[in-house]
Amino acid sequence: MINLRLATSADLNLLQHWDEQPHVIASNPNDKWDWEVELHHKSEGREQLIAEINGHPIGFIEITDPARDDSNYWGNVAVNLRAIDIWIGEENDLGKGYGTQMMQLALERCFTDPLVTAVLVDPLASNTRAHRFYERLGFQFVEQRWFGNDDCFVYRLNREDWHHENTIVS
Ligand SMILES: CC(C)(COP(=O)(O)OP(=O)(O)OC[C@H]1O[C@@H](n2cnc3c(N)ncnc32)[C@H](O)[C@@H]1OP(=O)(O)O)[C@@H](O)C(=O)NCCC(=O)NCCS
C-alpha cells in the first residue's frame, strides 16, 4: 500500500508545510532543514524519500551513509552503516501503522546492500514514543549522545536482528 519515491524540488512546499506541524517541530526543534538547498543537493551518501499511499504523500524519510555523508553529522563513525530520519507530515496520519510500514520499506532498502551491517537512528532523549516505535522494530539502545543542541538516544538495528517478524510484533 505504501511506496517510497525520491523527493524532488516539486515537493518543496509540502516539506516546508510539514516542517510547520507541531509534532514535526517537537521531534526536531533545533535543526532547521533548508529544503531549497536539500532538494538540490544530490549527495552519494544521502537519499531523501517521500512515502506515498496510492500516490498521496504522507511522510518523509532520509537515509544516509553516516561515514560518507558530507554534513559529517555522525562524526567519526564506522563504514557500512546507514542512518534513518523519519516523520509523518500530518498529525491525522500518526498512529495508523504508516510509520511502521515506511520503516519496513526503508530497512529493506538499507539492507539490500549486502555490505550494510546495521542501521542507526537518533531520536531525542525526550521522544519516548519514538523509542518505543524503534524498539518494536528491533532497534536496541546504544548510548545517549548530544548532537549539537539535541540530547539524543542512539539506537541500532544489526542486520542479524532484522527480521520481518520484528516489525509486526506489538
Ligand atoms: C515516529 C513515527 C514516524 C511513527 O509512525 P506512526 O505511523 O505514527 O507509528 P505506527 O502507527 O506505525 O506505530 C505507533 C507508534 O508510533 C509511535 N508514535 C505515535 N505517535 C507518535 C508521535 N507523535 N511521536 C513519536 N512517536 C509516535 C508510538 O510508539 C506509537 O505506539 P504507541 O501508540 O504504543 O505509543 C510518527 O509517529 C512521527 O512522524 N512522529 C513525529 C516525528 C518523530 O517523532 N519522528 C521520529 C524522530 S527520530
Image (cartoon, rainbow, N blue to C red):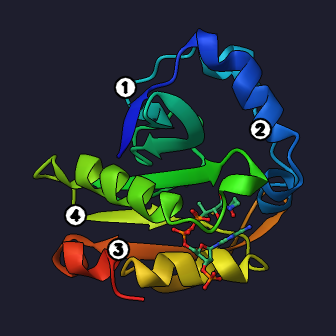
Which residue was labeled with disc 3?
Answer: 157
Q: Residue at x 44, y 43 (%)?
A: 64
Amino acid type at image mark 3: Leu
Query: Which callout, 2 or 3, points to the residue nearer the camera?
Result: 2
Residue 144 falls in image quadrant: bottom right
Give whichever of discs 4 and 2 has the lower sequence position.
2
The Cα–Cα distance between marks 1 and 3, rounded to whole angstroms, is 22 Å
Residue 138 at what x, y percent from top left? 36, 81
Q: Is residue 113 visible?
A: yes
Q: Amino acid at mark 4?
A: Thr
Which residue position holds label 2?
Answer: 18
In x, y percent, where is residue 16? 79, 28
**For marks 4 and 1 on the same chain, the one whose residue lies earlier in the sequence:** 1
Instruction: Identify the amino acid type marked 1.
Output: Glu
Query: In which image quadrant can residue 56 be found?
Result: top right
Q: Secondary structure at mark 3?
A: strand
**Residue placed under numbered mark 4 in the picture:** 117
Between the C-alphas of marks 2 and 3, the distance is 27 Å
Q: Dividing the picture into quarters, in which one does residue 35 lie?
A: top right
> Is disc 1 in contact with disc 3, using a CB cutoff of under 8 Å?
no
Sequence-wise, which precedes: disc 2 or disc 1? 2
Q: Which one is closest to the eye, mark 4 or mark 3?
A: 3
What residue is shown at x 51% (from left), y 23% (from top)?
7
Name the N-terminal-most of marks 4 and 3: 4
Which of disc 3 and disc 1 is earlier in sequence? 1
Q: Which residue is mark 1?
A: 44
